[in-house]
Image (tube, helix red, strand yellow):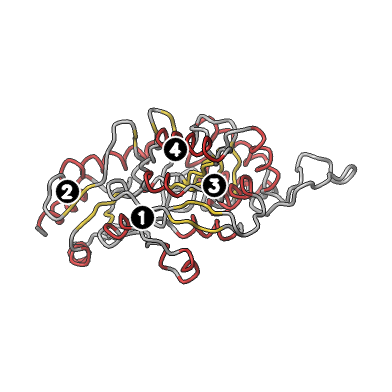
Amino acid sequence: MIPLFKVPMSDEAPAAVAEVVGSGQIGQGAKVAEFEEALAARIGNPRVATVNSATAGLQLALRLVAGDDDGQGEVLSTPLTMEATNWAILANRLRIKWVDVDPATLNVDLDDLARKITPRTRAIMVVHFAGYPVDLDRLAAILDDAEAAFGSRITVIEDCAHAWGATYRGAPIGTHGNISVFSFQAIKHLTTGDGGALALPTDELHERARLLRWFGIDRSADRLRNPPDVPEWGYKFHMTDINASIGLANLTKADEVVARHRDNAAFYDRELAGVPGLELTERAGDRQASFWIYPMKVDDRDGFLKRMDAAGIMASNVHERNDLHTCVREYAALLPGLERVAKRVVCVPVGWWVTDEQRRHIVDTIKEGW
Protein backbone atom coordinates (compact mmCIF):
# COMPACT_ATOMS: atom_id res chain seq x y z
CA MET A 1 0.00 0.00 0.00
CA ILE A 2 1.40 3.40 -0.99
CA PRO A 3 0.87 5.52 2.14
CA LEU A 4 -0.75 8.94 2.13
CA PHE A 5 1.57 10.16 4.90
CA LYS A 6 4.98 9.21 6.22
CA VAL A 7 7.32 10.66 8.85
CA PRO A 8 10.38 12.43 7.32
CA MET A 9 13.06 11.65 9.91
CA SER A 10 16.76 12.34 9.47
CA ASP A 11 19.25 9.56 10.21
CA GLU A 12 20.99 12.04 12.55
CA ALA A 13 17.91 12.58 14.74
CA PRO A 14 18.37 9.60 17.14
CA ALA A 15 21.91 10.65 18.04
CA ALA A 16 20.82 14.27 18.45
CA VAL A 17 18.07 13.21 20.85
CA ALA A 18 20.46 10.92 22.78
CA GLU A 19 22.86 13.82 23.22
CA VAL A 20 20.12 16.00 24.72
CA VAL A 21 18.85 13.25 26.99
CA GLY A 22 22.37 12.59 28.22
CA SER A 23 23.00 16.27 28.89
CA GLY A 24 20.41 16.51 31.64
CA GLN A 25 18.81 19.55 29.96
CA ILE A 26 15.69 18.27 28.26
CA GLY A 27 13.25 21.16 28.79
CA GLN A 28 13.39 24.50 26.99
CA GLY A 29 17.06 25.41 26.76
CA ALA A 30 19.95 25.98 24.39
CA LYS A 31 18.64 23.64 21.68
CA VAL A 32 15.33 25.50 21.51
CA ALA A 33 17.21 28.79 21.11
CA GLU A 34 19.41 27.26 18.39
CA PHE A 35 16.38 25.87 16.57
CA GLU A 36 14.60 29.22 16.70
CA GLU A 37 17.64 30.94 15.19
CA ALA A 38 17.77 28.35 12.42
CA LEU A 39 14.05 28.72 11.73
CA ALA A 40 14.34 32.51 11.65
CA ALA A 41 17.13 32.28 9.09
CA ARG A 42 15.21 29.79 6.96
CA ILE A 43 11.92 31.73 7.03
CA GLY A 44 13.53 35.15 6.71
CA ASN A 45 11.87 36.54 9.83
CA PRO A 46 13.95 37.07 13.01
CA ARG A 47 10.89 37.00 15.28
CA VAL A 48 10.24 33.28 15.80
CA ALA A 49 8.85 31.66 18.96
CA THR A 50 8.56 27.88 19.12
CA VAL A 51 5.72 26.09 20.92
CA ASN A 52 4.78 22.49 21.69
CA SER A 53 2.20 22.28 18.88
CA ALA A 54 0.72 24.39 16.13
CA THR A 55 -2.61 24.15 17.97
CA ALA A 56 -1.01 25.86 20.96
CA GLY A 57 0.48 28.37 18.53
CA LEU A 58 -2.92 29.26 17.11
CA GLN A 59 -4.42 29.62 20.56
CA LEU A 60 -1.51 31.83 21.62
CA ALA A 61 -1.75 33.91 18.44
CA LEU A 62 -5.41 34.65 19.13
CA ARG A 63 -4.58 35.55 22.71
CA LEU A 64 -2.01 38.06 21.45
CA VAL A 65 -4.50 39.92 19.26
CA ALA A 66 -7.90 39.33 20.86
CA GLY A 67 -7.09 38.96 24.54
CA ASP A 68 -9.62 37.45 26.93
CA ASP A 69 -12.72 38.39 24.96
CA ASP A 70 -16.20 38.96 26.35
CA GLY A 71 -17.59 36.11 24.28
CA GLN A 72 -19.04 38.38 21.59
CA GLY A 73 -15.98 38.91 19.42
CA GLU A 74 -15.83 37.00 16.13
CA VAL A 75 -13.04 35.40 14.17
CA LEU A 76 -13.56 34.84 10.45
CA SER A 77 -12.35 31.37 9.52
CA THR A 78 -12.62 28.55 7.03
CA PRO A 79 -14.54 25.34 7.76
CA LEU A 80 -12.30 23.31 5.42
CA THR A 81 -9.35 22.57 7.69
CA MET A 82 -8.23 20.44 10.60
CA GLU A 83 -10.47 21.10 13.59
CA ALA A 84 -7.47 22.48 15.50
CA THR A 85 -7.72 25.71 13.49
CA ASN A 86 -11.19 26.49 14.74
CA TRP A 87 -11.10 24.93 18.19
CA ALA A 88 -8.36 27.44 19.02
CA ILE A 89 -10.98 30.14 18.45
CA LEU A 90 -13.38 28.48 20.88
CA ALA A 91 -10.57 28.08 23.43
CA ASN A 92 -10.20 31.87 23.44
CA ARG A 93 -13.93 32.42 24.15
CA LEU A 94 -14.40 33.86 20.66
CA ARG A 95 -17.17 33.16 18.19
CA ILE A 96 -16.59 31.57 14.81
CA LYS A 97 -17.95 33.27 11.72
CA TRP A 98 -17.61 30.91 8.80
CA VAL A 99 -16.19 32.15 5.51
CA ASP A 100 -17.06 30.21 2.38
CA VAL A 101 -14.50 28.19 0.43
CA ASP A 102 -13.23 29.09 -3.03
CA PRO A 103 -13.81 25.89 -5.06
CA ALA A 104 -10.85 26.70 -7.31
CA THR A 105 -8.25 26.88 -4.53
CA LEU A 106 -9.93 25.27 -1.47
CA ASN A 107 -8.76 28.36 0.45
CA VAL A 108 -11.14 30.97 1.85
CA ASP A 109 -13.34 32.84 -0.61
CA LEU A 110 -11.94 36.37 -0.28
CA ASP A 111 -15.10 37.97 -1.70
CA ASP A 112 -17.15 36.31 1.02
CA LEU A 113 -14.56 37.25 3.64
CA ALA A 114 -14.75 40.92 2.64
CA ARG A 115 -18.52 40.89 3.01
CA LYS A 116 -18.40 39.37 6.50
CA ILE A 117 -16.03 41.79 8.27
CA THR A 118 -17.86 43.83 10.93
CA PRO A 119 -16.90 45.89 14.01
CA ARG A 120 -17.13 42.61 16.00
CA THR A 121 -14.34 41.00 13.95
CA ARG A 122 -11.35 40.46 16.23
CA ALA A 123 -9.14 38.49 13.84
CA ILE A 124 -9.11 36.66 10.52
CA MET A 125 -7.82 33.09 10.32
CA VAL A 126 -6.71 31.86 6.90
CA VAL A 127 -5.36 28.42 6.02
CA HIS A 128 -2.96 27.87 3.14
CA PHE A 129 -4.74 24.65 2.17
CA ALA A 130 -2.39 21.91 0.93
CA GLY A 131 0.39 24.51 1.17
CA TYR A 132 -1.11 26.73 -1.58
CA PRO A 133 -0.90 30.34 -0.34
CA VAL A 134 -3.92 32.56 -0.02
CA ASP A 135 -3.76 35.70 -2.18
CA LEU A 136 -2.14 37.81 0.53
CA ASP A 137 -2.05 41.04 -1.49
CA ARG A 138 -5.78 40.84 -2.14
CA LEU A 139 -6.33 40.09 1.54
CA ALA A 140 -4.26 43.14 2.53
CA ALA A 141 -6.39 45.33 0.26
CA ILE A 142 -9.53 43.99 1.94
CA LEU A 143 -8.03 44.89 5.31
CA ASP A 144 -7.27 48.41 4.04
CA ASP A 145 -10.93 48.87 3.14
CA ALA A 146 -12.09 47.48 6.48
CA GLU A 147 -9.70 49.76 8.37
CA ALA A 148 -11.05 52.77 6.51
CA ALA A 149 -14.61 51.71 7.29
CA PHE A 150 -14.23 50.69 10.95
CA GLY A 151 -11.23 52.66 12.19
CA SER A 152 -8.85 49.86 13.19
CA ARG A 153 -6.84 47.20 11.38
CA ILE A 154 -7.79 43.57 11.84
CA THR A 155 -4.97 41.10 12.45
CA VAL A 156 -4.58 38.12 10.15
CA ILE A 157 -3.39 34.79 11.50
CA GLU A 158 -2.03 32.50 8.81
CA ASP A 159 -2.42 28.82 9.64
CA CYS A 160 0.67 27.51 7.87
CA ALA A 161 0.35 23.90 9.06
CA HIS A 162 0.46 22.69 5.43
CA ALA A 163 2.76 25.40 4.12
CA TRP A 164 6.35 24.93 5.28
CA GLY A 165 8.50 26.07 2.35
CA ALA A 166 5.66 27.74 0.43
CA THR A 167 6.22 31.20 -1.06
CA TYR A 168 4.02 34.10 -2.14
CA ARG A 169 5.48 36.41 -4.78
CA GLY A 170 8.91 34.99 -4.11
CA ALA A 171 8.88 35.60 -0.35
CA PRO A 172 8.53 32.73 2.13
CA ILE A 173 5.26 32.35 3.98
CA GLY A 174 5.82 33.91 7.39
CA THR A 175 7.20 37.21 6.09
CA HIS A 176 4.10 39.07 4.91
CA GLY A 177 3.22 41.15 7.97
CA ASN A 178 0.78 38.73 9.59
CA ILE A 179 1.09 36.26 12.47
CA SER A 180 2.06 32.93 10.91
CA VAL A 181 1.79 29.61 12.73
CA PHE A 182 3.70 26.57 11.48
CA SER A 183 3.22 22.92 12.41
CA PHE A 184 6.08 20.48 13.06
CA GLN A 185 3.76 17.58 13.85
CA ALA A 186 4.98 14.08 12.96
CA ILE A 187 3.97 13.93 9.29
CA LYS A 188 4.68 17.51 8.23
CA HIS A 189 7.50 18.46 5.82
CA LEU A 190 9.59 19.44 8.85
CA THR A 191 8.92 17.53 12.05
CA THR A 192 10.08 17.85 15.64
CA GLY A 193 8.02 14.82 16.68
CA ASP A 194 5.38 17.36 17.60
CA GLY A 195 5.69 21.11 17.86
CA GLY A 196 5.10 24.39 16.14
CA ALA A 197 6.30 27.95 15.80
CA LEU A 198 4.93 31.45 15.49
CA ALA A 199 6.55 33.93 13.11
CA LEU A 200 5.57 37.40 14.38
CA PRO A 201 5.40 40.73 12.53
CA THR A 202 6.54 43.00 15.41
CA ASP A 203 9.03 42.92 18.27
CA GLU A 204 6.25 43.59 20.78
CA LEU A 205 4.21 40.56 19.70
CA HIS A 206 7.36 38.44 19.62
CA GLU A 207 8.26 39.34 23.18
CA ARG A 208 4.73 38.68 24.44
CA ALA A 209 4.65 35.32 22.67
CA ARG A 210 7.98 34.32 24.26
CA LEU A 211 6.63 35.18 27.72
CA LEU A 212 3.12 33.81 27.40
CA ARG A 213 4.25 30.41 26.10
CA TRP A 214 5.72 29.76 29.59
CA PHE A 215 3.23 31.12 32.14
CA GLY A 216 4.15 34.75 31.39
CA ILE A 217 7.42 34.32 33.33
CA ASP A 218 10.65 35.83 32.03
CA ARG A 219 12.94 32.78 31.86
CA SER A 220 16.03 34.98 31.57
CA ALA A 221 15.43 36.54 35.01
CA ASP A 222 17.09 35.33 38.21
CA ARG A 223 14.07 33.65 39.79
CA LEU A 224 15.94 32.75 43.01
CA ARG A 225 17.46 36.11 44.01
CA ASN A 226 15.15 38.48 42.15
CA PRO A 227 11.86 36.76 41.24
CA PRO A 228 10.25 38.52 38.26
CA ASP A 229 6.74 39.90 38.33
CA VAL A 230 4.18 38.32 35.97
CA PRO A 231 2.19 41.18 34.45
CA GLU A 232 0.24 38.89 32.08
CA TRP A 233 -0.52 35.25 32.81
CA GLY A 234 0.42 32.65 30.23
CA TYR A 235 0.42 28.96 29.31
CA LYS A 236 2.69 25.92 29.32
CA PHE A 237 3.13 25.92 25.56
CA HIS A 238 6.93 25.89 25.26
CA MET A 239 8.98 23.50 23.13
CA THR A 240 11.57 21.17 24.71
CA ASP A 241 15.21 20.65 23.76
CA ILE A 242 14.32 17.07 22.79
CA ASN A 243 11.88 18.30 20.15
CA ALA A 244 14.22 21.07 19.05
CA SER A 245 17.07 18.58 18.52
CA ILE A 246 14.83 16.52 16.24
CA GLY A 247 13.87 19.68 14.37
CA LEU A 248 17.49 20.76 13.90
CA ALA A 249 18.40 17.35 12.51
CA ASN A 250 15.45 17.40 10.11
CA LEU A 251 15.84 21.01 9.03
CA THR A 252 18.87 20.07 6.95
CA LYS A 253 16.70 17.83 4.74
CA ALA A 254 13.44 19.81 4.78
CA ASP A 255 14.16 21.61 1.50
CA GLU A 256 14.82 18.26 -0.17
CA VAL A 257 11.53 16.93 1.22
CA VAL A 258 9.53 19.90 -0.09
CA ALA A 259 11.27 19.67 -3.48
CA ARG A 260 10.20 16.05 -3.93
CA HIS A 261 6.60 16.89 -2.98
CA ARG A 262 6.65 19.61 -5.64
CA ASP A 263 8.17 17.34 -8.26
CA ASN A 264 5.52 14.68 -7.70
CA ALA A 265 2.78 17.34 -7.78
CA ALA A 266 4.10 18.72 -11.08
CA PHE A 267 3.97 15.20 -12.53
CA TYR A 268 0.32 14.85 -11.46
CA ASP A 269 -0.49 18.30 -12.86
CA ARG A 270 0.85 17.28 -16.27
CA GLU A 271 -0.61 13.79 -16.35
CA LEU A 272 -4.07 14.49 -14.89
CA ALA A 273 -4.95 17.71 -16.69
CA GLY A 274 -8.16 17.26 -18.64
CA VAL A 275 -9.07 13.84 -17.23
CA PRO A 276 -12.90 13.57 -17.36
CA GLY A 277 -14.63 13.54 -13.99
CA LEU A 278 -11.60 15.06 -12.26
CA GLU A 279 -10.75 18.71 -11.61
CA LEU A 280 -7.39 20.00 -10.38
CA THR A 281 -7.01 22.98 -8.07
CA GLU A 282 -5.69 26.39 -9.09
CA ARG A 283 -2.03 27.09 -9.83
CA ALA A 284 -1.13 30.81 -9.87
CA GLY A 285 2.31 31.89 -11.02
CA ASP A 286 2.89 34.21 -8.07
CA ARG A 287 2.52 31.35 -5.58
CA GLN A 288 4.75 28.33 -5.02
CA ALA A 289 2.86 25.69 -3.08
CA SER A 290 4.55 23.20 -0.78
CA PHE A 291 2.07 20.39 -1.62
CA TRP A 292 1.91 18.79 1.79
CA ILE A 293 -1.07 17.01 0.25
CA TYR A 294 -2.27 16.83 -3.34
CA PRO A 295 -5.99 17.63 -3.46
CA MET A 296 -8.28 17.24 -6.44
CA LYS A 297 -12.02 17.19 -7.00
CA VAL A 298 -13.69 14.07 -8.38
CA ASP A 299 -17.27 13.41 -9.43
CA ASP A 300 -17.57 9.99 -7.76
CA ARG A 301 -15.44 10.05 -4.64
CA ASP A 302 -16.69 6.77 -3.22
CA GLY A 303 -15.91 4.97 -6.46
CA PHE A 304 -12.55 6.72 -6.69
CA LEU A 305 -11.57 5.65 -3.17
CA LYS A 306 -12.56 2.04 -3.88
CA ARG A 307 -10.39 1.97 -7.02
CA MET A 308 -7.44 3.43 -5.16
CA ASP A 309 -7.77 0.94 -2.33
CA ALA A 310 -7.97 -2.00 -4.74
CA ALA A 311 -4.80 -0.75 -6.43
CA GLY A 312 -2.88 -0.46 -3.16
CA ILE A 313 -3.01 3.35 -2.98
CA MET A 314 -4.12 5.20 0.14
CA ALA A 315 -6.42 8.14 -0.58
CA SER A 316 -8.56 10.37 1.59
CA ASN A 317 -10.18 13.78 1.81
CA VAL A 318 -7.82 14.34 4.83
CA HIS A 319 -9.97 17.05 6.47
CA GLU A 320 -13.72 16.96 7.09
CA ARG A 321 -15.64 20.22 7.02
CA ASN A 322 -15.73 21.63 10.55
CA ASP A 323 -19.05 23.46 10.43
CA LEU A 324 -21.22 20.35 10.84
CA HIS A 325 -19.91 19.39 14.29
CA THR A 326 -22.41 19.67 17.15
CA CYS A 327 -20.13 21.94 19.18
CA VAL A 328 -20.26 24.68 16.50
CA ARG A 329 -23.85 24.23 15.39
CA GLU A 330 -24.79 27.73 16.59
CA TYR A 331 -22.48 29.26 13.98
CA ALA A 332 -24.16 27.55 11.00
CA ALA A 333 -24.07 29.54 7.76
CA LEU A 334 -24.90 29.14 4.09
CA LEU A 335 -21.68 28.18 2.33
CA PRO A 336 -22.47 27.36 -1.31
CA GLY A 337 -18.83 27.10 -2.40
CA LEU A 338 -18.09 24.55 0.32
CA GLU A 339 -21.25 22.62 -0.58
CA ARG A 340 -20.00 22.29 -4.16
CA VAL A 341 -16.66 20.78 -3.22
CA ALA A 342 -16.90 19.17 0.25
CA LYS A 343 -17.98 15.77 -1.08
CA ARG A 344 -15.63 15.87 -4.07
CA VAL A 345 -12.25 16.61 -2.47
CA VAL A 346 -9.79 13.73 -2.35
CA CYS A 347 -6.01 13.51 -1.94
CA VAL A 348 -3.52 10.98 -3.30
CA PRO A 349 0.05 10.29 -2.10
CA VAL A 350 2.43 13.08 -3.20
CA GLY A 351 5.19 12.94 -0.58
CA TRP A 352 8.93 12.45 -0.67
CA TRP A 353 8.52 8.66 -0.36
CA VAL A 354 6.51 8.29 -3.60
CA THR A 355 8.84 6.89 -6.27
CA ASP A 356 8.65 7.58 -10.00
CA GLU A 357 7.18 4.11 -10.53
CA GLN A 358 4.58 4.60 -7.80
CA ARG A 359 3.41 7.97 -9.07
CA ARG A 360 3.02 6.45 -12.55
CA HIS A 361 0.95 3.66 -10.99
CA ILE A 362 -1.21 6.26 -9.23
CA VAL A 363 -1.81 8.22 -12.45
CA ASP A 364 -2.55 5.11 -14.49
CA THR A 365 -5.03 3.88 -11.85
CA ILE A 366 -6.84 7.22 -11.89
CA LYS A 367 -7.03 7.32 -15.69
CA GLU A 368 -8.28 3.75 -15.92
CA GLY A 369 -11.32 4.74 -13.89
CA TRP A 370 -12.70 6.93 -16.67
Mark 4 nearby-residue class (10 Å; few <14, some 14–19, many ≥20): some
Q: Give whichever of discs 3 and 1 has the lower sequence position.
A: 1
182 to the left or right of 319:
right
Q: Amino acid at mark 1?
A: Phe
Q: Position of residue 136 (x, y in %)?
A: 42, 36
Work out whether mark 4 precedes mark 3 in sequence or the reverse, and give the earlier one.
3
Report the residue marked by disc 3.
123
Residue at 37% across / 44% down in the picture? 111
**Residue type for callout 3:** Ala
| Real-space Cα separation, disc 4 to disc 3, in angstroms | 13 Å
Q: Which circle's residue, 4 or 1, is located before the other in the chain?
A: 1
- Dot 1 surroundings within 10 Å: few (below 14), some, or many (20 or more)? some
Q: Nearer the viewer, residue 320 or 111?
A: 111
Q: Are marks 3 and 2 in contact (CB under 8 Å)?
A: no
The residue closer to the viewer here, 69 or 82, is 69
Q: Mark 2 packing: few (<14 Cα in 10 Å), some, or many (20+)?
A: some
Q: Disc 4 designates what residue?
A: 142
Tag 2 secondary structure: helix
Which quadrant of the rendered structure holds the N terminus?
A: bottom left
Q: Of the residues tagged 4 and 3, which is closer to the observer? A: 4
* Residues tagged 2 and 4 counted as in contact (Cβ below 8 A): no
Q: Secondary structure at mark 1?
A: loop
Residue 4 placed where, x, y %? 32, 56
Label placed on residue 241: none
Comes first in the chain, label 3 or label 2: 3
Query: Nearer the observer, disc 3 or disc 2?
Result: 3
Residue 39, above or below 23: above
Q: In the rendered structure, find residue 360 and report the number of the disc placed on it.
A: 2
> Residue 341: where, in percent of width, then height?
27, 57
Between the C-alphas of marks 1 and 2, the distance is 18 Å
Mark 2 to mark 4 CA distance (whole Å)? 42 Å
